[in-house]
Image (spheres, rainbow, N blue to C red):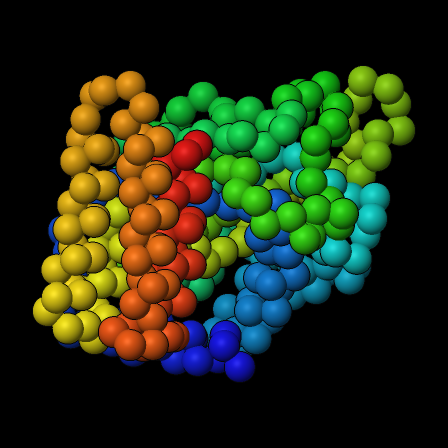
Amino acid sequence: MRRPVAAIALAVLALAAGLAGPAAAAQRTFLMAPADLVAAPDLFGAKALARSGVLGKAVGLKSGALRFGKGLCPSLLLDPNRRLTRIRVLAGPASAAGVVGKGLAKDLAGALGAMNAVSWLPPAAGKTRQAFWVAEPPAADVVGFTTAGFAAGDRTGALGRDDAANRTPGFRFIVDLGVEPGIGSVDFALVVTTELPAKKLGRPGKRSECIMVASMVPVDLQALRDLVAATPLGTVTRNRLAYLLDRVQRFLGSSRAGAAERAARNVRTFALEVAQRSENEIPPAFAEAMITRANAVAEALSF
């Protein structure tokens, strides 16, 4: 029953953060793991079809796959031969046509807006440590990642059903959000490219462009500050946690070698401190939310 309790705690935190008012917009960090991406078409499919009354002709089924706009989202979980070979995070609904082409993106901006896809501002940055993947050159309206052999149709390292349990973060992107999410999630417009095995050596297999919306939570220092601010805490505990986060901030602001690694270690110290104070000083569900987010922040800093 821990997850439902934690979900309730997060809902309470979100309400408290909303009552406190949004912070100023700034660069925010997000992580994606193979498991998130492999499941994304199916999760989005259920969400989009459930809103078909609002989306109208923008959503439907075609040959058993979700159709969103004119793009198709075949399931990676059901088809063991299909692999994900490219990921692009769009700067918002208006960016769709410039990235996937006007034909594929017809009526898509409105549909993405109806699905609450957020808009962000440049500059943006992407980095990957997923084996056999590379970050695409920076662009104003997209952060992209591809398999190293994408252009030649080499699917080495491509993601598929076998990666559905891999929750190790493999992709990090940083964008400047126009609106602060507080402790809540952010709905990003994504374009994922999936392909089937090639019929000819050196040529890509049949590819499908899936345009979707995926929810992610920020994993950075501000996310931890927002969680602490929205959690019911005593003065001593609140000051102690704030002190630890201030230490992280000092390392992040340092130009010394190894500063990011020391910041990550201090974030883990923060998580340990929360764990030690759970039950007596921090309600367990709230502590779980902070520990989970702190571990993700430490992963992001370690990239």
The location of residue 235, given as percent across then percent down, is 10, 69
Q: Is residue 70 visible?
A: no
Which picture quadrant has residue 34?
Answer: top right
Residue at 55 percent across and 24 percent down: it is 134
Does the rendering let one see residue 264? Answer: yes
Relative depth, front residue between 94 and 190: 190
Residue sitting farthest toward the right: 199
Number of disc labels: 0
- For image coordinates 54% across by 38% down, the residue present is 170
Please identify the quarter of the rendering in which residue 303 is found. Answer: top left
Q: Is residue 4 above or below residue 248?
A: below
* Residue 196 percent across, percent down from the top left: 80, 39
- Of residues 141 and 273, the one nearer the viewer is 273
Which one is in front, 74 or 285? 285
Q: Where 252 falls versus 218 (above or below)?
A: above
Residue beneath the point at 55% across and 69% down? 47
* Relative image position of residue 81 (x, y in whole percent): 83, 44
Residue 274 in the image, given as x and y percentages of width and height: 31, 62
Q: Residue at x 63, y 29 (%)?
A: 131
Drawn side of residue 263 relative to residue 106, left or right? left
Relative placement, left or right, of 134 versus 172 is right
Side of 102 where 301 appears, left or right: left
Eyeballing the image, is 237 above or below 151? below
